[in-house]
């Protein structure tokens, strides 16, 4: 699956498709939270600009699967979380969607409070290069 992100004023549009399009990212992970199926009203994008080394990519993927995803799945108000990868730039964008900005803030606080698991190396897990918040979100599931 592939995703394209577009922003216009406050609105974020995420278009999901089975076809690769110009500017699209590969969807590595797509998970629902407790409010899955609800129309999201807020999102934040965490941009990791890359290029990520193989070791950093593997560390981030492990951290997401083992720590971040379970936290998102349990977070009240969490709607959907996407991890998008641009293989040409070796860059990642994490899109977290929630029912409102308060839920999004709580999700971020919960994720940031997690301890590293045994074997994780903080040097391979830099924070995002930039973060953007969007109070209006639209998800389009295209063919």
Image: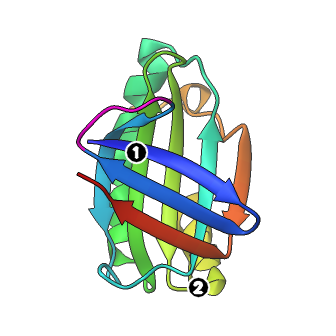
Q: Is residue 124 above or below residue 102?
A: above
Magenta highlight range: 18-22
- Structural crowding at the residue carrying mark 2, measured as other residues with C-alpha within 10 Å and reported as few (<14), some (14–19) or many (≥20): some
- Structural crowding at the residue carrying mark 1, measured as other residues with C-alpha within 10 Å and reported as few (<14), some (14–19) or many (≥20): many
Identify the mark at residue 3; answer none if there is no mark: 1
Q: Is residue 133 above or below residue 124?
A: below
Q: Is residue 57 left or right of residue 137?
A: left
Q: Earlier in the sequence, mark 2 or mark 1?
A: 1
Residue at image mark 2: 100
The residue at the far front in this view is 143
Q: Quadrant of residue 1?
A: top left
Q: Is residue 24 left or right of residue 5?
A: left
Which of the two residues, 94 or 19, is positioned nearer the viewer here? 19
Q: Residue 53 placed where, x, y %?
A: 50, 13
Secondary structure beneath label 2 = loop
Q: Judge depth for marks 2 and 1 and give the one in front.
A: 1
Distance from Cα at disc 2 to Cα at disc 1? 22 Å
The colour mode here is: rainbow
Q: Does residue 41 appear anywhere in the picture?
A: yes
Q: Residue 18 placed where, x, y %?
A: 23, 42
Which of the two residues, 120 or 141, is positioned nearer the viewer here? 141
As for residue 19 lying within the magenta part, the answer is: yes
């Amino acid at each position: 699956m592939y995703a394209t992100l577009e922003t216009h004023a406050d609105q974020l549009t995420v278009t999901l498709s089975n076809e690769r399009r110009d500017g699209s990212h590969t969807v590595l992970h797509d998970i629902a939270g407790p409010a899955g199926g609800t129309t999201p009203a807020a999102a934040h994008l965490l941009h990791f600009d890359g290029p990520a080394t193989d070791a950093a990519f593997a560390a981030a993927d492990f951290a997401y699967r083992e720590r971040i995803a379970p936290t998102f799945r349990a977070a009240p108000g969490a709607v959907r979380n996407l991890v998008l990868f641009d293989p040409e730039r070796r860059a990642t964008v994490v899109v977290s969607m929630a029912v409102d900005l308060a839920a999004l803030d709580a999700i971020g606080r919960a994720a940031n409070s997690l301890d590293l698991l045994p074997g994780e190396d903080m040097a391979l897990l830099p924070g995002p290069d930039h973060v953007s918040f969007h109070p209006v979100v639209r998800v389009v599931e295209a063919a």
